[in-house]
Amino acid sequence: MEDHVLNPYVPYPVRIDDIEVATEDKSLKTFKFVFLNDGDEEKFAYQAGQFAELSVPGVGEIPIGIASSPVEKGFVKFTVFKAGVVTSHLHNMKVDDIMGIRGPLGNWYPWDLLEGKNILIVGGGFAFTTLRSSIVYMLNPDNRARFGNIDVVYGARTPGMLLYKDELIAWEKRDDINMHLTIDAPADGWEYNVGFTPPITEQKAPQGDDNTYAIVCGPPIMIKFTLPVLEKLGYADDHIIMSLENRMKCGFGMCGRCGIGKELVCKDGPVFTLDQINKTPREY
Amino acid sequence: MLEYNDKIREISARLLKECRVEMVIGFRKGSMPMMNEPCFITKADDAGQLVWDSNCGINLANYLTNRKEKIGIIAKGCDSRNIVTHIIENKISRDQLFIIGVPCQGMIDKRKINAMFDGGVQKVTEDGETIQVDAGGQTTALAKADLLQQNCAVCIHRNPVIFDEMVAEPVDEQQNVDRYEDVRRIEAMNPEEKWNYFDDLLAPCIRCYACRNACPLCYCPTCFVDESKPQWVGKGQDPSDVRTFHFLRAFHCAGRCTDCGACERACPVGINMRVFTKKLEKECFDQFGWEAGLSPDERPPLDTYRPDDPDDFIR
Amino acid sequence: MNMKLVKIDKKQWANGLEDLRNSYRLFGPVKEKDYHSFKALAKDEQPDLSFSNSRLSPKTLLFPQSEAIIEFSLDENDADHHIMKSVEKDVSPQAVIGVRPCDAKSVRLVNLNFDTPEYRDPYWADVLAATTFVGLACDEPKSTCFCTSVDCGPYSEEGLDVLLVDDGDSYLAKVLTEKGRSLLDAAGWGAAEAENTDLADRKAAAEAKIASTVTTDNLKNQDLMTLHGASFWEEVAFGCLNCGTCTYTCPTCWCFDLQDEVHGKAGKRMKNWDSCMFPLFTMHTTGHNPRGTKTQRVRQRFMHKLKYFLDKYDQGIMCVGCGRCVSQCPVNIDIRKICNLMNAYQADNAACVEQE
């Protein structure tokens, strides 16, 4: 990774290359960015699980998980939920608008540790972004052989609220990954599971053991009910990997606001094991 | 006012023992000269911690906002008026409170005393109307009347306006007090003089918000300076932002401020921001005959309409 | 790096300062109304070395309260519109004359935050690299000083390039670094060697005057989660106003905010001091606030300074005993008292550690 970034406050200039409405209620959009300067994309080399600060001059910055995967070249993608000042402004921007990206920031899913292991991915709502990055990474022909079984449980309220739906359905048809897609209530034309993510996880997920790791990303309510399920399935706390969110500004561990105990979510995280999280104050 | 200590402790212990209240809010002795620390006690045995002296300038009504408990609160004149305002504004209900009323004889100005002794004050003790200051190896006796906080010097409501039990007989209110001498002095300045005066006044501000946070009136969940949608005020040191904060906060306190002086006492850099609230207090008095917080049965002028409200600004 | 003492006759002090101006921008304590601030020294202006300490710490010289760090044009007619660029800072050599040892040490502690193996804040680090610190030993500590309890002291040399000791009609200068040597040479203060003067006695005398102490020996051993769940936080936090006084006057506090300001068709990204005391500090856009209560925020400040920082860097606590927060807190929240509480805390065996 980047040894010593010269000025971590200055973003790489990027151009919006494509904007896709990601969910049926238009609350999420996927932005595709290309770097304006040659060489910046290489400097931005990232790993699945990391985030970046999307920087809009005159408006502000937001820390967003990188949705594209390191194996995808020529662009970076982020899926952004419209929530506050910056995200609302971003949602109103157009293709060819210029802004900035700072990063990559934070740590990543522990790919070294996951080598040769079975992986369970549990995602809910729009927390699926870095999970997409991870799945695309693992399914890439160069990487697939390095991992064991891959199971994915991903739930949303309705089919139209699932992110990357076309890709999800394509993955569902593959035999090197087990997709367990679910929605809250039955819907016309929906062929897959119906039910909240935690009970579907309980039904479909593989048992936890020394060779299996779970990566869990989702809204607090989903996490609250999924963790007991994983415990029941035999996943040890240091085999459950989570990505935390917190209010951030600098994104590289200096402004102090994302700190929980000794950890800085932007720098020591956002990826933590449940074991590490249990040893920090519950201030996230 | 040391003579109040015993009574305060006796009442507080009794209230807790009888479970009339769940907590008593008062002051305990501070670790620094001229400082007391706002505290609460929940056990009758702890009543001995409570103190009252001429260093109780912080307004304890500030600690009542939105609390759910039954609370015993020690309140001097201005504090009690803020309790009335809190009741009118639904920040606390009357039946939650047991108000221990303190007839106030004025608080001393720690900044003034520190400046007199170049900051090397070791200890300050009071004995009636005399304040003894130990500094630089010497003890100096001073008249309390010369050391009062600026708001106390012009106070006309020293006795609590609302209480459940008083710790002593009411004191005489000060007579022939000119509350607005300083305001008129500034009003008489020409625009350039005023600009320079306010610029100089606000120059040391570090946007710590001690003034706002010490004020019982400032209880907005999101203060206007912190709003982001839209953002009204910048967060840096641009003088126009600093001025906006102070002016607008004063306007938000118009018709409500009791001139308790907690803002000035809290300010770490010694800004006399009371000139703004006093100007507005004078306006409310002149235009509506209004003084804040005297009775829970009267609604303030800024949320009532009377046909005879002044309207000479309509041309 | 020689450690000899140099004698600077006070009659040569003013001239030396003016000579320094040929190669340094000068900063020092300046009296304003009834307090001192560290400011740029105007021509012929001398630092007021009779001060005890400044109201705001000299961290303002390396880390201003409000600083533009990025600038950009929003005018679509400009070729580089919307491209964010770094604001250039003046990193020509500067000297701070008269910084107290506590504040000098604080610079070292803050530097742990701004200059890390992975990232370097150039606005802090470049200015720091250009700064020579000339310290002034404290022979008259204040009643609120407790530096000797926290790996510092009135004659501490950490973070200094030169240590000055007031010797009546002269200053004794202990040269601590090459930078310090260069500064003395530039001022023409290199010549006279002080005869046989050992600072040890003076140092001991000054340290003996420090009346205020805190105990910190057990902080490292305390279990972080147990301290976090301690029963005393609610009482400790009650009087706190959650204003920014302590954090802003503290030389070792460094939290900041990044905010864009736009004027017409151009804008800047500002780096402004921020405070963990403010409710908004940790507020998520969703409205969720991990530290939404006053008690949580007050606890955070003291846990950070006296435990998290200690555990993370193993370089002592994040406090240099300058006493500013103690003397300026509007409601007398006293870090000394809280430090002792945390150091001595023993959880009841029966009590569960409550996560609030």
Image (cartoon, helix red, strand yellow):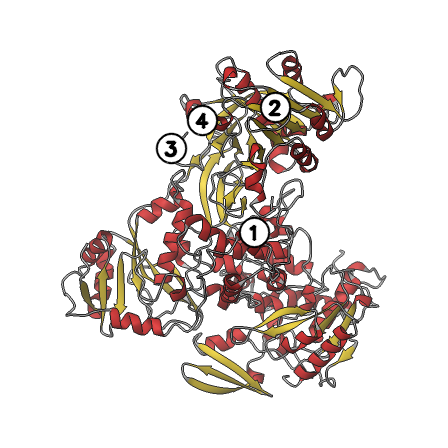
Q: Mark 3 = which residue?
A: A3
Residue at the spot 41% in from the left edge and 72% down from the top edge? C142
Asked whether A180 or C296 is in front, the reply is A180
In this rendering, the label closer to the viewer, 4 or 3: 3
> Horizontal and vertical percent for residue A85?
62, 37
Q: Upstream in the sequence, badge 4 or badge 3?
A: 3
Drawn side of residue B314 relative to residue A247, left or right? right
Amino acid at circle 3:
Asp
Q: Secondary structure at mark 2?
A: strand
Q: Disc 2 marks which residue? A: A30
Q: Is residue B188 above or below residue A42?
A: below
Measured Cα–Cα span from mark 3 to mark 1: 33 Å
Res B310 seen here: no
Q: Nearer the viewer, residue C304 or C255?
A: C304
Q: Are marks 1 and 2 on the same chain?
A: no
* Residue C303 in the image: above or below residue A66: below
x and y, in percent, of residue C270 in the image: 49, 44
Q: Closer to the camera, A102 or B71?
A: B71
Q: Are the residues under badges 4 and 3 in a single subunit?
A: yes
Q: Are marks 4 and 2 on the same chain?
A: yes
Residue marked by disc 4: A44
Q: What residue did someone put label 1 on? A: C225
Q: Secondary structure at mark 1?
A: helix
Q: Amino acid at mark 4?
A: Phe
Chain letter belonging to callout 1: C
